[in-house]
Image (tube, rainbow, N blue to C red):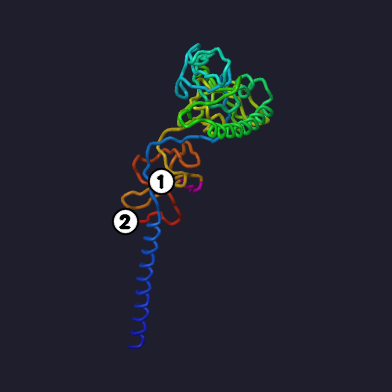
Amino acid sequence: MAKKTRKRFNVFFMILVLSIIGLFLWDYRSSWIAGSLSFETVHQGLVQHEKTVKAVFANTETVLTAPAEGTVVLVGEEGKRFKKGESVARVIPAGVGHEQSDSGIWISAPVSGLFYSQRDGLEQIMTPENLMNMDLDRLLAQTQNNGTETEQTETAQENTKENSQPADNSQNTIVSLHSPIGKMVNNLYPSWVFVYLGIQDSLAVGDVVAFVIDDEEYYGTVMKLSAQPGGAVIRFSQYVQGTEENRIREIAWRFKSPTKGLVVPASALCTSGEEKGVYVLEDGVIRYQGVIVKDSNENLVCVEGLPEGVQVVVNPREGIEGMYVKS
């Protein structure tokens, strides 16, 4: 009888020990899982739909050339606006035989606009007229080739200038007769651009599209669609600052209107059957909460059905329903 009692006691003791170990392991597992979870507060935000695209800009530009061989002295700083007829630079002729005064030959602005001494050689190639009338595939190929050649030529010219100009006259440039000295950019005329969109079936001529350029939003009208290369010619409603120097660049195309509302990270969204939901933290306990998805992109989801300020699990996993999270 004593043996049976001792045996029952041993079995009971083993069950008790195993139960304690099990509870310890469960608590340890729950604590480990809870500790590995990340949370984020539900807040008001904007779900945007943007795609980075390559763009080639065209402005209304006029190239200025030197009336004689000599040294060019600029009147104002780069990007200064001049009225038509105002002096933008002067050329001090080189050598003898010139019947000019000591002040040199003054160069007047043929049109009103911004003056830039830096050029890319594309001023007479990338024009609004050429974008509308020329074969875009050939035009853009020529643009790329011309841009590369111009960069190499200007680098060689800069090296020559550095070696030939005196130290006290480093800001002046020695030019030959009829060589370009700069350009006038009419910033009262709208900028044009060819954009490699890749999705033409969602656009039509006359559509108004939005772009983000240097953190500024610009709107333009689709003037022409192209299958080869795939993209569209866009006329903006205004001059786009900075495109006179950085003509070929990447910009953000807003192909769909943004949605404003309560947002959560896209990784927080779960599916339970046909229902969408998230795991929220309420009074230290994780609970599943169904939501209505209004809009989403790769990073954010705009939802209804959650109070603002509640915390959601960013990296949910199975088995966290009802889990207690220590504060």
Closer mark to the observer between disc 1 and disc 2: 2
Q: Amino acid at mark 2?
A: Lys
Residue that appears at 50% across and 48% down: 273
The reply to whether residue 255 is in sight is no
SS category of the residue bearing label 2: loop
The reply to whether residue 50 is in sight is yes
Q: Nearer the viewer, residue 166 or 204?
A: 166
Question: Magenta stretch mostly in which secondary structure?
Answer: strand
Q: Nearer the viewer, residue 133 or 248?
A: 248
Provide the residue designation for mark 2: 326
- Classify 321 as above or below 3: above
| Left or right, 36 with reference to 178 | left
Q: Nearer the viewer, residue 162 or 120?
A: 162
Which residues lie in the magenta part? 269-273
The image position of residue 14, as x and y in percent, is: 37, 77
Q: Is residue 88 magenta?
A: no
Residue that appears at 38% across and 64% down: 26
The image position of residue 61, as x and y in percent, is: 56, 20
Provide the residue designation for mark 1: 289
